[in-house]
Image (tube, rainbow, N blue to C red):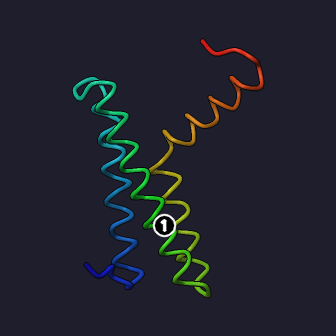
Amino acid sequence: MRIPRNPFTLLAVSVFIALSTILVEKLFWYIGYLNNLQLLSILALMHVVVSALIIIDNPGKLLLRLGTVVIFIIGQQWLIELIAMLIIWQARGFAP
Protein backbone atom coordinates (compact mmCIF):
# COMPACT_ATOMS: atom_id res chain seq x y z
CA MET A 1 0.00 0.00 0.00
CA ARG A 2 1.38 3.38 -1.01
CA ILE A 3 1.18 6.30 1.42
CA PRO A 4 -0.21 9.44 -0.25
CA ARG A 5 2.36 12.24 -0.34
CA ASN A 6 -0.01 15.13 -1.02
CA PRO A 7 0.37 17.32 2.09
CA PHE A 8 -3.27 18.40 2.06
CA THR A 9 -4.47 14.80 1.93
CA LEU A 10 -2.26 14.00 4.91
CA LEU A 11 -3.49 17.15 6.67
CA ALA A 12 -7.09 16.01 6.11
CA VAL A 13 -6.20 12.61 7.59
CA SER A 14 -4.60 14.41 10.54
CA VAL A 15 -7.77 16.45 11.13
CA PHE A 16 -9.87 13.27 10.92
CA ILE A 17 -7.67 11.53 13.50
CA ALA A 18 -7.83 14.58 15.79
CA LEU A 19 -11.63 14.68 15.58
CA SER A 20 -11.82 10.93 16.17
CA THR A 21 -9.61 11.30 19.23
CA ILE A 22 -11.79 14.05 20.65
CA LEU A 23 -14.91 11.93 20.02
CA VAL A 24 -13.40 8.86 21.73
CA GLU A 25 -12.32 11.02 24.66
CA LYS A 26 -15.84 12.43 25.06
CA LEU A 27 -17.40 8.93 24.93
CA PHE A 28 -15.26 7.75 27.85
CA TRP A 29 -18.18 6.58 30.02
CA TYR A 30 -19.78 4.59 27.21
CA ILE A 31 -16.65 2.81 25.96
CA GLY A 32 -15.01 1.81 29.25
CA TYR A 33 -11.64 2.79 30.69
CA LEU A 34 -9.37 0.12 29.19
CA ASN A 35 -10.97 0.17 25.75
CA ASN A 36 -10.89 3.97 25.79
CA LEU A 37 -7.19 4.05 26.66
CA GLN A 38 -6.37 1.50 23.96
CA LEU A 39 -8.30 3.43 21.30
CA LEU A 40 -6.69 6.71 22.34
CA SER A 41 -3.23 5.13 22.24
CA ILE A 42 -3.78 3.74 18.73
CA LEU A 43 -5.10 7.09 17.51
CA ALA A 44 -2.15 8.90 19.12
CA LEU A 45 0.32 6.61 17.36
CA MET A 46 -1.42 7.15 14.01
CA HIS A 47 -1.48 10.91 14.61
CA VAL A 48 2.24 11.01 15.42
CA VAL A 49 3.07 9.10 12.22
CA VAL A 50 0.89 11.29 9.98
CA SER A 51 2.16 14.50 11.60
CA ALA A 52 5.77 13.37 11.20
CA LEU A 53 5.18 12.57 7.52
CA ILE A 54 3.73 16.03 6.91
CA ILE A 55 6.58 17.79 8.72
CA ILE A 56 9.35 15.73 7.08
CA ASP A 57 7.96 15.91 3.53
CA ASN A 58 7.40 19.70 3.54
CA PRO A 59 10.64 21.36 4.66
CA GLY A 60 9.93 24.80 3.16
CA LYS A 61 6.24 25.22 4.03
CA LEU A 62 6.23 26.82 7.47
CA LEU A 63 2.47 27.49 7.67
CA LEU A 64 1.62 23.90 6.78
CA ARG A 65 4.05 22.62 9.39
CA LEU A 66 2.69 24.99 12.05
CA GLY A 67 -0.86 23.96 11.18
CA THR A 68 0.12 20.33 11.59
CA VAL A 69 1.59 20.99 15.03
CA VAL A 70 -1.52 22.94 16.12
CA ILE A 71 -3.85 20.17 14.93
CA PHE A 72 -1.67 17.63 16.75
CA ILE A 73 -1.81 19.62 19.99
CA ILE A 74 -5.59 20.00 19.78
CA GLY A 75 -6.18 16.35 18.92
CA GLN A 76 -3.76 14.89 21.44
CA GLN A 77 -4.51 17.16 24.37
CA TRP A 78 -5.30 14.12 26.53
CA LEU A 79 -1.82 12.68 25.84
CA ILE A 80 -0.10 15.97 26.68
CA GLU A 81 -2.10 16.19 29.94
CA LEU A 82 -1.23 12.58 30.81
CA ILE A 83 2.49 13.14 30.24
CA ALA A 84 2.42 16.37 32.28
CA MET A 85 0.59 14.58 35.09
CA LEU A 86 3.18 11.78 35.14
CA ILE A 87 6.04 14.30 35.22
CA ILE A 88 4.43 16.16 38.14
CA TRP A 89 3.89 12.90 40.03
CA GLN A 90 7.54 11.94 39.52
CA ALA A 91 8.71 15.39 40.66
CA ARG A 92 6.59 15.22 43.82
CA GLY A 93 7.67 11.68 44.55
CA PHE A 94 4.20 10.19 44.86
CA ALA A 95 1.18 9.31 42.80
CA PRO A 96 -2.44 9.12 43.95
Relative to residue 77, is residue 62 depicted above or below? below
Relative to residue 90, is residue 62 depicted above or below? below
Residue 11 rendering spot, x and y as whole percentages: 40, 72
**Tag count:** 1
Relative to residue 53, is residue 42 depicted above or below? above
Relative to residue 62, is residue 68 depicted above or below? above
- Look at 45% across and 64% down and name the residue there: 49
- Look at 27% across and 24% down and name the residue there: 32
Q: Is residue 28 left or right of residue 85?
A: left
Q: Is residue 14 left or right of residue 2?
A: right
Query: Which residue is under mark 1?
Result: 51
Residue 16 rendering spot, x and y as whole percentages: 31, 60
Residue 28 rendering spot, x and y as whole percentages: 31, 28
Rate crowding at label 1 as few (under 14), some (14 to 19) or many (20 or more) other CA atoms within 10 Å. Answer: many
The front one of 74 and 37 is 37
**Secondary structure found at label 1:** helix
Residue 33 rendering spot, x and y as whole percentages: 33, 25
Identity of the amino acid at label 1? Ser
Q: Is residue 53 left or right of residue 85?
A: left
Residue farthest bottom in this picture:
60
Q: Is residue 63 left or right of residue 11?
A: right
Residue farthest front in this picture:
1
Residue farthest left in this picture:
30
**Among the 4 quarters of the image, the one containing residue 14:** bottom left
- Look at 77% across and 25% down and name the residue there: 91
The C terminus - image quarter: top right
The N terminus - image quarter: bottom left
- Look at 29% across and 82% down and name the residue there: 2
**Among the 4 quarters of the image, the one containing residue 70:** bottom right
